[in-house]
Image (cartoon, rainbow, N blue to C red):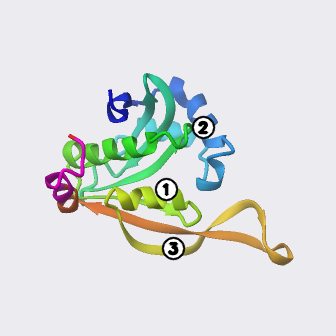
């Protein structure tokens, strides 16, 4: 059994939200995300344009993902958030691969996009290796909470916008670079 088959996505239920908020608050994840309030997650679970999933590894909750723009007339689906607790096991890669297939095959996306904090080099490299292309950088657009720079100045990070187009995904499939 491969990791790809061991990682599954299931729709988030309201009873999962304590787990979701806890994963966001984990010290290993805080530097790379801007946590939401529980009510924001409730909205994403209920809002028809969004998809909120629990990521499971061997049927055990391992994190969550949020897609937005699922009904976009421009067919541009956003990977709004991916937050995982097990690190370094390949769960993130397996999850991104499942999400690409979901976006293009099930949601009919033309474009699948995301933004990633500049400091999150590990995630950025994963996205590049999975075919995402950097489109641009929003310089110093997010404040780093709790971090102070020289002379007490606030510290900010960039957001890097990346995307994968349907034709690029299909080309990767034709080359055998996407799992079936």
Q: Which residues are magenta?
A: 170-179
Query: Residue 23: which numbered mark, if any?
Result: 2
SS category of the residue bearing label 2: helix
Residue linked to disc 1: 123
Does 180 sit above or below residue 148? above
The x and y percentages for residue 110 are 22, 58
Name, please, the residue furthest toward the right.
Answer: 151
Q: Could you tell me residue 95's position as x and y percent? A: 39, 41
Q: On the rendered structure, is 80 left or right of 166?
A: right
Is 51 above or below relative to 139? above
Q: Is residue 178 magenta?
A: yes
> According to the image, label 3 marks what residue?
138
Picture residue at 28% right of the left edge, 54% below the top: 72
Q: Nearer the viewer, residue 29 or 70?
A: 29
Mark 3 or mark 1: whose residue is earlier in sequence:
1
What secondary structure is found at the residue carrying circle 3? strand
- Residue 178: image x %, image y %? 24, 48
Q: Residue at x 32, y 41 (%)?
A: 98
Q: Nearer the viewer, residue 108 or 157?
A: 157
Residue at image location 52% in from the left, 57% down from the top: 122
How far apart are labels 2 and 3 at the CA level?
A: 26 Å
Q: Quadrant of the N terminus?
A: top left
Q: For the residue labelled by badge 1, is the local secondary structure a helix, a strand or a loop?
A: helix
Which part of the image, by quadrant, shows the C terminus? top left
């Amino acid at each position: 059994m491969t990791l790809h088959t061991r990682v599954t996505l299931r729709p988030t239920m309201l009873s999962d939200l304590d787990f979701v908020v806890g994963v966001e608050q984990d010290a290993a994840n805080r530097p790379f995300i801007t946590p939401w309030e529980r009510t924001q997650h409730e909205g994403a679970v209920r809002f028809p344009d969004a998809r909120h999933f629990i990521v499971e590894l061997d049927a055990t909750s391992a994190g969550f993902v949020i897609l937005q723009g699922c009904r976009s007339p421009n067919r541009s689906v956003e990977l709004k958030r991916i937050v995982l607790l097990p690190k370094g096991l390949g769960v993130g890669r397996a999850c991104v691969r499942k999400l690409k297939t979901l976006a293009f095959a099930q949601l009919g996306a033309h474009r699948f996009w995301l933004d990633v904090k500049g400091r999150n080099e590990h995630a950025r490299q994963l996205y590049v290796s999975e075919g995402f292309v950097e489109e641009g950088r929003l310089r110093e657009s997010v404040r780093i909470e709790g971090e102070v720079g020289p002379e007490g100045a606030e510290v900010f990070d960039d957001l890097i916008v990346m995307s994968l187009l349907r034709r690029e995904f299909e080309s990767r499939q034709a080359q055998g670079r996407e799992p079936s």
